[in-house]
Amino acid sequence: MRFSHYNILSSQTKEGKYVLLNGFTGLLDVIDKEAYDLISSYAEADDLPPDVIESLSGIKEQFYERGYLTDLSYEKEIAAAKKKALELYAEYLKAEWDVVIVPTLACNYRCTYCFEKGSGYPTPSMSKNQVDAIFRIIPDKIGSGERITLYGGEPLAKENRHIVEYIVDKGREIGRTFFAVTNAHDLDHYMDLLGDGGISTLQITVDGPKRIHDHRRIALDKSSSYEKIMHNIEIVLHETTAAISLRINIDKRNVQYILEFLEDLEKRGILDHKNLQLAASPIVGVGDLRITSDDIRKLEKESEERYPQLKDNFMSRTRTDNSNILASLYLGEIIHPKVAACGAAGTTKIFTPEGKIYPCWGCIGQTDQVIGTYDESGNIIWNETVVENWRKNSIAYNECLECKYAFLCGSGCRRPALPGETTSHDYDCEYYRDLFADYLAKVVEHV
Ligand code: SF4
Ligand code: SF4
């Protein structure tokens, strides 16, 4: 008998308790210090000594049932995890598509950390014939209630209005709404398309207060992007039913200004708006400018002290984990196991105006990552080699299966590494290694 390899222990909570979570079974419990000491002392033991087994007698059966204790050897436990991952992955591949439509790869901004730097990305806009083809392909591939994503370039640039309206109308015909990733510069040209039944959710990026944001997110016409974007955000919140996920891309250059930005949101009276959600995210692929786990910890602490309502609701990644963990704590639900970190391993299909289909948002424009092509008649030719390569980005097939976080993490981001990155999932590993134990303890403090 041994402790499961997939046991994860939290840091100590304010009440002196700990959380024990088993990644394999997706179950968790709050435990006391005595149990914590025992589990952490014998976490790697192949066979628990008789006196330890004896000391577990009161909770042994429960620990077995919940997967914290096992009679399987390490190798057999990994083999059981592999079997489970393969079964889950077979289900994952049956799932409906996450459809992303890219009306254009052109952008009206030249953000300092974006691939559109310099002369931008030369490309035509999507034609109505291409949109018709996409809507011939997708109706029986996307689940009922699933939103279609609009991505770019800048999908909601004013020049795209005619084709975006056409796409939204086609979506409405099949009962779909839209999520758009936009810089919001020209949102005033789209107000009538926003809200229930149309573009229902927007992801808008603002990188700090005006003087910081304007130096990072640069409009081609050199106008202040901050004022225009904030004005548009306020109109969306006050005059439409659309929800906004406000993304704050953070690196070493702007991390010290984020509180100032939150102050501005407060002054504008929108920090607590029911349709506004903050989603701060570290920028990856910027080498030494990437913020560290300590930077994230400090930023969260300072922002939560100033604005307690942001507790566990500020970094986009934490919020997702929290909702899973809270459902398990409050409702006894099993934490949904992940076999892949995102849809790129099989479900995401990104249609571009060049007639290409990509699996990953971060790979658009990389021709060696094209998983297929589509034509105006709605025919698709899949590139099976690339499809197969992306399918391997699952814990069912890669080294992550032996990581205790495997079923929580799903093996992290798997796009090709950016300059300065060892791998694209460096950040995922850092998060679980450095921050997750603290988050787990913090979530329990809500209960
Ligand atoms: S592989 Fe990484 S960049 Fe690509 S969609 Fe997934 S999380 Fe995003
Ligand atoms: S990406 Fe890192 S944290 Fe995630 S499962 Fe793989 S090894 Fe573990």
Image (tube, helix red, strand yellow):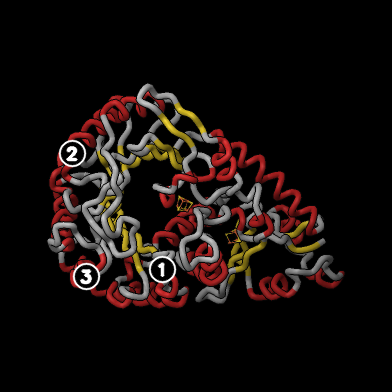
Front in this rendered view, residue 339 or 222: 222
Residue 286 circle label: 1
What residue is shown with label 3? 209
Q: Horizontal placement of 107 versus 186: left or right?
A: right
- Residue 91, by quadrant, is top right
Residue 214 appears in view: yes
Q: Position of residue 133 (x, y in %)?
A: 35, 25
Q: Horizontal placement of 359 versus 36: left or right?
A: left
Q: Eyeballing the image, is 261 above or below 179?
A: below
The residues tagged by marks 1 and 3 sit, at their Cα atoms, a distance apart of 21 Å
Front in this rendered view, residue 190 or 12: 190
Residue 228 circle label: none
Of discs 1 and 3, which sits in the foreground? 1
What residue is shown with label 2? 161
Instruction: Identify the secondary structure beneath mark 3.
Output: loop
Three-letter residue code for mark 2: Arg
Q: Position of residue 266 (x, y in %)?
A: 20, 67
Instruction: Identify the secondary structure beneath mark 1.
Output: loop
Front in this rendered view, residue 93 or 408: 93
- Chain-order first, disc 1 or disc 3: 3
